[in-house]
Amino acid sequence: MKLSRTDFEAHFSAGTLRLAFIGMSNIGKSYTASRLAKSYNFELIEIDQLIQDEMGHSDMEAFAQWQGQPYSEGYAKREMESTALETRALEKAMNAEGSNIILDTPGSVIYTGEKTLKALQSTHYIVYISASDERVEGLKKQYFANPKPLIWREHYQKASHQSNEEAILTSFPKLLTARARTYEDLADITLPSEFILDAKNQVSDIFDFLKPAI
């Protein structure tokens, strides 16, 4: 949703502002969304939670175990099922009623289909939280320490000399690079992860950053 600064502030005052945070898992979407929700009284809708509710899973770890890794038997089928789950959850969230809403989306939101993404663009002001090269290295470590469901599509590639884990490490940055281009095309504004993690920046600085320049 293309907004001017005046539009942004008018929607917020009227309680009709709808934000959607996109970006890779562990990049800071949930952290930022929850801070804004608490400080500015947004209604926060977590797409992951809607998926867990439908699946009957108690946490993301259980969902990650169900989906498995791209080298796991039956992964391709579960990847398709996961995309369908996410699409239904996103569409449900987009139709939610409330005053000033933030959608906290999974990293694979970009695979929910052209029709769904166009609807998201037309109804929400989309904020892409981007990752620097240094942050990408940190995301790799976090992925192995705290696995989350991850849709790889064609980006997982394994050379003959590699183990499954080595292939994950070399494929992950390529996945991020490919996704970054799509996130940028989808977003109305890009918020660097370094900005939200900088201790000098308060939640009010983040909220002001989100407003269009003019």
Image (cartoon, helix red, strand yellow):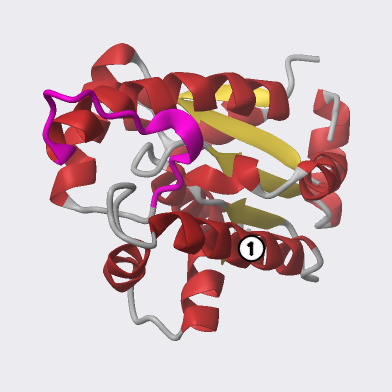
Identity of the amino acid at label 1?
A: Ala
Position of 104 with respect to 212 (left or right) is left
Q: In terms of depth relative to the viewer, which is nearer, 69 or 212? A: 69
What span is in magenta? 150-164
Q: Please check the rendered image and state whether residue 158 is part of the magenta-colored stretch, yes or no.
A: yes
Position of 189 with respect to 11 (left or right) is left
* 94 to 213, vertically: above or below: below
Name the quadrant containing residue 135.
Answer: top left
| Residue 37, percent from left and from top | 54, 56
* 41 to 158, vertically: above or below: below
Q: In terms of depth relative to the viewer, which is nearer, 168 or 183? A: 168
| Residue 96, percent from left and from top | 77, 70
Residue at numbered disc 1: 84
Q: Please name the residue shown 55% across and 65% down the image.
A: 81
Position of 157 with respect to 104 (left or right) is left
Magenta segment's dominant SS is loop
Q: Please name the residue shown 11% across and 23% down the image.
A: 161
Q: In terms of depth relative to the viewer, which is nearer, 30 or 184? A: 184
Quadrant location, the C terminus: top right
Q: Please name the residue shown 60% across and 67% down the image.
A: 85
Residue 195 in sight in this render: no
